[in-house]
Amino acid sequence: MFNEHQSMEMWSGRFLYLFLWLAVTATSQSTGQSVQTAAGAAGFCFHASGVNLPLGKFLLIRKGDQVGALRIIQITPDTQSKPRAGEWLGSVEYESYFILKPSDSFSQLANRKHLRELRFGRIKGLGFHYSWQSGNQEAVVGPWKFLFFAQDGMFMTAMDFWNRANHDSGLEFAPTNITEVDLLDPRERELHWYPYDENRDIQCPVEAFSKHNPSTISSAHD
């Protein structure tokens, strides 16, 4: 059974989920189904304890010597269903890698490569406290699972049975402009690592490191 503390964690996690969901939907297209949110289309955006990812660019994740890499490959809206109450319907294909120490190579097949799909179905239930989005919104990166709150928005928390979206897992996240796993090197000194911070308020998009073409990721129209 859950104790009082665990119950508070669960409900505060729901409110954090709602906060980030509202922040994303407020800047998204108001009609139809969009491929990316406005934040994700702009680039890597860190707000509170969530991060939005642009298509195709790797996000590095580390804890101690363990390092993961995640990128969104494709976002496919469900064009056959009309979204209700701001919900986004569709699927998200992602790719992830995991290594046990920074000197390892991400490109080695033995390093727990995952090629999976997230599914965003209808919101079910009654009211905010008793509703949830059907499907599967948890991305796997090695031993970690990350809950997505939008088609390109992810909580910076490793999910488990006891801890939900508002828990500091001791992880750090570094945005990159890199699209090829062979070029990833978590030992690069120019990488900027962002820890979990529910009070974060920084300019979006943030600078993303690239070994071959350093720049700030901006919209696809630039």
Image (tube, rainbow, N blue to C red):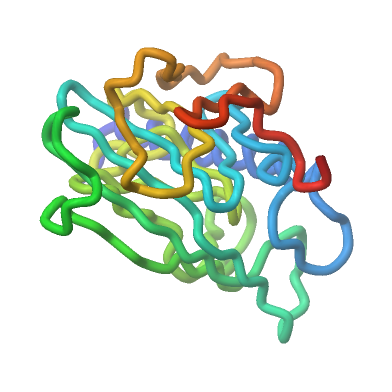
Rendering coords of residue 205 (x, y %): 68, 28
**Quick check: 123 left or right of 179?**
right
Of 167 and 36, which appears nearest the observer?
Answer: 36
- The number of callouts visible is 0
Task: Examine the rendering and report whether any part of residue 87 can be seen.
Answer: yes
Residue furthest right in the image: 31
Rendering coords of residue 191 (x, y %): 42, 19
User: Please, is residue 95 above or below residue 64 in the view?
Assistant: below
Q: Choose top left, top right, bottom left or bottom right for residue 36.
A: bottom right
Please state, as top left, top right, bottom left or bottom right, where the C terminus lies in the image: top right
Residue occupying image coordinates x 39% and y 55%: 138
Of 120 and 9, which appears nearest the observer?
Answer: 120
**Quick check: 186 left or right of 175?**
left
User: Please, is residue 136 above or below residue 12 in the view?
Assistant: below
Q: Choose top left, top right, bottom left or bottom right for residue 61.
A: top left
Task: Examine the rendering and report whether any part of residue 175 can be seen.
Answer: no
**Quick check: 37 left or right of 126?**
right
